[in-house]
Structures are given as C-alpha cells and as structure tokens.
Image: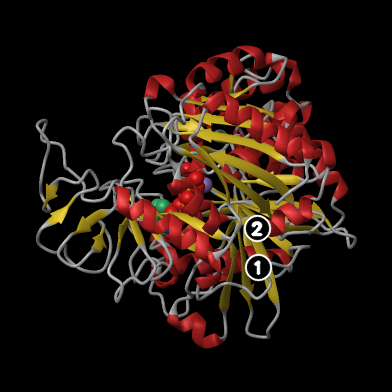
Amino acid sequence: MTEHKELLTWVREVKEMCQPDKVVWIDGSDEQRRALLAEACKTGEFIELNREKLPGCYYHRSALNDVARTEGLTYVCTSSEEDAGPTNNWMAPEEARDKATAIFAGSMRGRTMYVIPFSMGPIGSPFSKIGVEVTDSIYVVINMLIMTRAGNAVLDQLGTDGKFTRCLHGKAELDLKKRLILHFPEDNTIWSVGSGYGGNALLGKKCLSLRIAGYLARQEGWMAEHMLILGIQHPDGQIDYIAGAFPSACGKTNLAMLVPPDALAKKGYKVWTIGDDIAWMRVGPDGRLWACNPETGFFGVVPGTGSKSNPNALKTLQRNSLYTNTAYCPDDQSVWWEGCDGPPPANLLDWRGEPWHPGMVDEHGKKLHGAHPNSRFTAPAAQCPSISPHWEDPQGVPISAIVFGARRERLAPLVYQCFNWQHAVYVAATMVSERTAAAEGKRGEIRHDPMAMLPFCGYNMADYFQHWLDMGKRITHRPKIFRVNWFRTDDDDNFLWPGFGENLRVLLWCLERCHGHAGAIKTPIGYIPTYDSMHWDGLDFSRDTFGDLHAMYIEDWLEEQALNRQFLAQFGSRLPHELWYEHAARDHRLRGED
Ligand code: GTP
Ligand code: SPV
Ligand code: MN
C-alpha cells in the first residue's frame, strides 16, 4: 500500500485516538466505490435514485443542525493570535488540540475509519498539493472521490517521503456544542469534528485548497482564491480567460457555466468552464497570471438550478451525482427543489424527510422549503457540457480579466473597471455583500467580504492584502480588474438586471476594455460602461434601466466610505498603507476634490 513512514505513523496515532473498529484505505477503484455506496444504502445514509432517470445518483439527508458551514466554529490556530488576524477566530494550537482530542477520543468506536489520499490539482503536477483525509463518513469518502483525484495513484506520487496535509475528520456526535473546524497552518494540519457538511468536512476544499493553500501560497509566491474560472471564445476563435471572486451562493457556479444568449451564440461566442469555486494562480514565464482549478467536481447550490438559469449544471447532474438535502419523491425515487423545471410531484418529502407540499408554513407562519436553501449537488466536472478541453492543464490558463462580484441591492453598479491594480486591491478588500444560506447566520445582513475570502483566509487578512499588492508587482502583464453586481434591485425589489446568460454582455465589455476598445465614463469609483459600448444583440434593454443600474448616489457612497474606514481600521498598523492611500483618494474623488 504505502511505505511512507510519516503517513503510517500518523494514521496509527489517529487510530489510537479515535478507536475505530477497522481501517480501510481508499484505493480509487470503482469496485471499492460501489461497495461503499451499497453499504451506505443499506444503512440508510444514502438512497439510490431512479436508475433510468438519474443513473448512478444518490440522495443524502444531513442532520438537521448540519446544513451549512459554521464560521463561528472555524478557527485558525497559529501560535500567535496576531497571525490569524481580526477577521478569523483564533485558538492557541495546544488548547485547540486538547479540546478536539476530547471529542475525537473513542469517537469512531463501532465505525470504520477511511484513509483517503488525494491530490488537489492533477497528480504529479509541480503545482498540485497532496492531502490525506482520515474520516469515519462514507458520505465524505464518496464526495471526495468526485471532488478530488483520490486513491492509490496519489500514494504512488507521495512515495516514501512526499509532503502532505494531514486532514483529520470525524462526525463524532454531530453536536453543535462538540463541533470544531481547526486549521494548524504552521503544522500543515486540519482537524474537523462534529459536522458532515461540505465545507466543514470535505477537507480538500475550503480547508486545504483555500485556508492552508493560501498560507503556503503567500510563502511560495502564488495565490489561492475563492474564484471561478471560465473561457470566452470570440467569433474569431480566440479565447480569453476570466477569473471571478463572488462570496458563497452569489453566482460563481452559474457564471462558470454560462450559456450565451441566442443572438450572441449565433455571432460565434462560446463559453468554456474551467472551475466554479477555487482558483490557484501563479505568474507564468510569460509574466501573465495563470489559473488552474484544483478540484475535479462541483459542490453546487441546488435551489434555483433550472433549464433557464443553468442548463449546463442541470445536464451535469443527471448522472453519477449526489444530492444533499433536496426534497425527495419516494414514488419514483426522484428529487425536487425550488426553481427546478417541473411542479413538485405528489407525496414529496422535504429535506428533513417530512411530508411536504408548496405553501406549507411552520408554526410561526414562516414558509417551509421543500429543499433546504443550501441543499447541494456533488457532480463530476468532466460531465459538464461546457467543460473546457484545458480544464486539467497543469499550468492552467492565462487570465485576461478578474471580476469581483457581491450581492448588493443598492449602491454597487452593474459593472465598473478599477483604475489600476492597487485601486483594485482596495475595491476588492472593501467589498461588501449580503449574507446567504451557505453559512449559518442571518441572511440578508451585509458584511465586508474582502475578495470573497472572509471565511477562507488562513492567516491575517492584512498580510493577505499585502500579498495581493506584492503579486501585482510580480505580474508584468496584469489582468484588468472589474467589480460587478448582478443583484441591484428597483424600489419594488425586482432585479434590475436579467443576469445569468445575459451576464456575458458585461464580461464582453470587460474583455473589450482589456483589449482597449470599449467606451467608458470615468466616475469617482472607476470606469463605467456607456450604453452604446455594450453588445445588445437580441436583448431589448432600456437606456433608462441601464442608467438606474449605474446611478451613483454620492451620499450613499460616503456612508459606505465610513463603513470601509471602520473595517480597515481594525487591522491597525498591519494594514498596508496603500489601502489608506486608495481610501483617501476615493474620498477626495467622491467629494469632487481631485
Ligand atoms: P458557492 O458554491 O457557495 O461558493 O456559491 P456560488 O458563488 O457558486 O453560487 P451559485 O452560482 O450557486 O449562486 C447561487 C445563487 O445566486 C442562486 O440563488 C442563483 O439563482 C443566484 N444567481 C446566480 N447568478 C445570478 C444572476 O446573474 N442574477 C441573479 N439575480 N441571481 C443569480
Ligand atoms: C461555499 O460555501 O462557498 C461553498 C460550499 O462553495 S462549501 O463547500 O461548503 O464551502
Ligand atoms: Mn464556495
């Protein structure tokens, strides 16, 4: 199996602590995967879905208290609290280990412990990172087999002394009071206990590929970002690649799988998907920024996925996929969710397993959902109709533009271009978004979410800003940077912008700005498009509404400036002075003083 001494020793130590009945190494074979699926169906952890309609698909319901990431229980455990910074929860490494050990101790009695060697990025690529996740959850194993490259080939790559991230996961009692998601960046170790939910439990994802990888990336001179990657093919066949950072449940999966509106498709525009959640980016020998997707699957938001909003996602998840916390129809073993194509079938069970029909309310009169708002699909990326032929290229794809998007009903216009890299770092660092169902907490409440990385930065956010500034100096051919917002509403709360496929029009404007030939107007916050600089083929969109989408209310921006000042101030002297410079410069521009 393996002669990697450090790995064998670690697995033995974990076994002694958790006391599983047996240990099974995940080899990556189809045979083993099938056996695990059969076992999960026997215990009720999985339900096999209709073999004709949804071949190879399974349904899983989580515990009621385990439906989203728990940011309040997620910690960065560096030896100094300063190194975690004011935006992370911090716990001293020793205390964290003691607390978690008490929960892990004996927690796998009567269970099997699975050992999953996995690679983030193609196996053997110099840019990939290897992890080994130990878990007592078959659900985690099956997810990891979709989301990562896992099995014996990774052990071979690891050899007898390769480096790997130790990823320990246990369900324990799935008790909120005994749940901890702990990162030990100085030790290249992750401990997660008490949750089976995606971002808490699939440790290759946010824990390794963003928090730990981000920590390493800063030391090694690259970037680990919460970004989608897509390619836009122009009518002449040229392809431009764009990376986009949006907070959780704010549109990355949808944008990554964008289907061009008919009129633009007819002209020859085409969109290619590379990744929908995580981008690892490096400076290439040509001085450009190159991005790759370290994952092999999509762990996407289910509600709202329909043939209008995201037909590519819908096609991707027709086979070999997992559905977690959607509604379930026992009559024909199918799944249903809000925003899917058809009406709900009779005899539906909601995500909790209770009989459900539309219009149901709880005892407080609050609407009950059939599918949990954060119900998720896990689907192989290779099955996506728009997947790019380059999605597994080890060196990645060259990035022409970066877009930062967040969810704002007001203030943020549809799109604006930043003046330069340093200005863009300020714009991204002070990005504000409304909370979504992807994490526990009050939905709709606004908060600063710098670079869409607030919950995912594994070290002091001020140092992360500095890293962004430093990277800008190292990239000789810098991507142009834009801020977008698909979510601006009118006074009746209707979205002003149709979004989804129509977002291509905004991306085309961005790319034409990169190539230097689209019209724009300079404003205090950046360059906004003129109506006539946009492609409107096939869309009847009024000049007035376009104006509303970009309307600037100076008073509101000055209020926002006050919030930004407060946000930046919490980093004290660790904050790069360039950000204060940009803050003051925007203030001056807003007051008409420049
Ligand atoms: P994570 O997987 O949590 O990181 O999220 P994500 O950024 O991939 O989010 P996703 O694409 O799944 O978007 C989720 C929500 O955004 C759904 O409710 C979508 O309907 C909504 N959404 C996505 N794109 C648009 C858009 O262009 N306009 C509007 N109005 N809503 C959108
Ligand atoms: C997110 O919350 O940003 C996700 C889902 O992409 S999770 O895997 O839970 O992080
Ligand atoms: Mn995400």
| Circle 1: residue type | Trp
Q: Residue at x 62, y 37 (%)?
A: 167
Q: How is the image coloured?
A: secondary structure
Question: Would you call the spot at circle 2 few (<14 residues within 10 Å), some (14-19), or many (20 or more)?
Answer: many
Q: Residue at x 79, y 52 (%)?
A: 282
In the image shown, does 400 or 296 lie closer to the viewer?
A: 296
- Measured as percent of width and height from the top left, residue 503 is found at 49, 64
Ligand 3 is within 8 Å of the C-beta of the residue at disc 2: no
In the image shown, does 113 or 178 lie closer to the viewer?
A: 113
Query: Pointers 1 and 2 in contact (CB under 8 A)?
Result: yes
- Measured as percent of width and height from the top left, residue 355 is found at 11, 49
Horizontal relation, residue 466 to residue 490: left or right: right
In the image shown, does 54 or 104 lie closer to the viewer?
A: 104
The extreme right residue here reads 285
Nearer the N terminus, badge 1 or badge 2?
2
SS at mark 2 in the image? loop
In the image shown, does 420 or 32 lie closer to the viewer?
A: 32
- Measured as percent of width and height from the top left, residue 576 is found at 77, 27
Measured along the vertical axis of the image, is residue 516 above or below residue 238?
Answer: above
The residue singled out by tag 2 in the image is: 293
Horizontal relation, residue 302 to residue 426: left or right: left
SS at mark 1 in the image? loop
Residue 255 visible in image: no
Q: Residue at x 72, y 52 (%)?
A: 155
The residue singled out by tag 1 in the image is: 391
| Circle 2: residue type | Asn
Residue 128 visible in image: yes
Q: Residue at x 78, y 59 (%)?
A: 124
Q: CA distance from mark 1 to mark 2?
A: 7 Å
Q: Quadrant of the C terminus?
A: top right
